[in-house]
Amino acid sequence: MSTPHQVPTYPDLVRALADRGLLNGRWRQVFEAVPRSRFVPADVWRQLPDRCEPVVGTDAWLALVNSDEPVVTQLDDGAVGGPGVATSSNSMPSMVARMLGLLDVGDGMRVLEVGTGTGYVAALLCERLGDDLVHSVELDPVVARQAADALARTGYRPHLRVGDGEQPWPGLGPVDRLISTCALRYVPYGLLRQVRPGGVVVAPLAREFWSGALAQLRVQDDGTAAGPFRGGATYMPMRAHRVPDLHEVRGRGRARASGLDPARLLDLGFALFARARLPGVRLVHKDTDEGVQVWVTREDGSGATAVTGQEVWQYGPGFLWEEIERAWWEYESAGRPGAEQFGLTVTDRGQQVWLWDPREVIRPARA
């Protein structure tokens, strides 16, 4: 005799996050008090590797909402008849827990969230700190209105603003903590100016060379900020920071033997190293029966594709795959440092990735 299908519950999800060490006593109480379902609309999608799949039926909706998965809540910036690209979501709960833990908030601290989304993170912050200490900005007016409604229905009233989160909040003054729930290609210096010296910024950097990473920065007295990377993080980019995954490639292909299995490139530590050594180079991949296939491109029209166990094909000017291999051997010579050994410094002149120490900046390689 078959048994009824057990739909997961939100307490099950919170318990699982706590068992993984992602929620301490205070944050566990906060998560328990703020059910995720109150911030997820009825029409949602599950993100698959190649598309977004509509979620049909109450049980399927509950199963997704009460799981440790992101829930896509908007396609194509809300336009009708688009290609079906996810443009807003309720983030994976384990990632939310990680980011809030890294934010290191304390009683009485003022927090600015960039990217209100569904309002779930703002509600968690309100439950932890109180409404008046939480500020959240959202660019999309439709998304912002839905979040404001959900927050009001659940009894939370943080300070909300519709606007560009990359720009300073007029009249806000310095906050103690800043969290971005959209990915950034770079950390805008204007955001740092919103955070007091000694304050903390937690933000995901957008994928360029394969994978995104989570940065935890502390603002210094001189207005700069520096801190380590804290593992991988894949978020939808801020709209102003969106770029195509790959550049346009020019020229006929040239084949050569590969001296490196492309699967070895799919390492977050190497992604951070390569991003600094080869700025502007983008890499994407897909799994194959034998391993992986990767594509790399650069703005000058050069590109390459490599498949595990097969030849490499290069296109356009230069020899991009040789540059990739050279960067890999440099990374291996350094002992293949893990992602947690890398960090980021942001100043009014830009940002720099470093290894082990902020003084050990990784400089761009010469092509």
Image: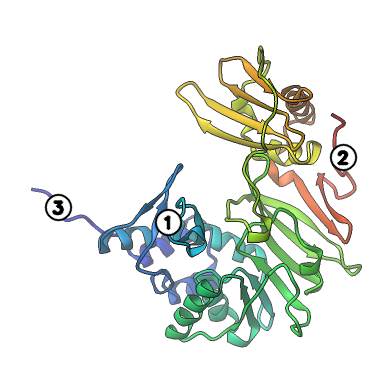
Q: Sequence-wise, which precedes: disc 3 or disc 1?
A: 3
Q: Which residue is mark 1?
A: 81
Q: Which residue is mark 2?
A: 363
Give the residue drawn at x 47%, y 85%.
152
Compute the Cα span from label 2 to label 3.
60 Å
Q: Which residue is mark 3?
A: 3
Q: Amino acid at mark 1?
A: Gly
How many numbered discs sit on the rendered protein?
Answer: 3
- Please tell me in which quadrant of the rendered image residue 173 appears: bottom right
Q: Is residue 264 visible?
A: yes
Depth check, mark 3 against mark 1: the one in front is: 1
Q: Sequence-wise, which precedes: disc 2 or disc 3?
A: 3
Left or right: residue 68 compared with residue 191 = left
- Quadrant where the C terminus sits is top right
Mark 3: few/some/many CA within 10 Å (<14, 14-19, 20+): few
Residue 343 is situated, as x and y percent measured from the top left of the image, at 77, 50
Compute the Cα span from label 1 to label 2.
44 Å
Give the residue drawn at x 77%, y 34%.
300
CB of mark 3 within 8 Å of CB of mark 1?
A: no
Q: Looking at the picture, does residue 151 appear above or below residue 164?
A: below
Residue 51 is situated, as x and y percent measured from the top left of the image, at 43, 46
Compute the Cα span from label 3 to label 1.
41 Å
CB of mark 1 within 8 Å of CB of mark 2?
A: no
- Please tell me in which quadrant of the rendered image residue 50 appears: top left
Q: Looking at the picture, does residue 181 appear above or below residue 328?
A: below
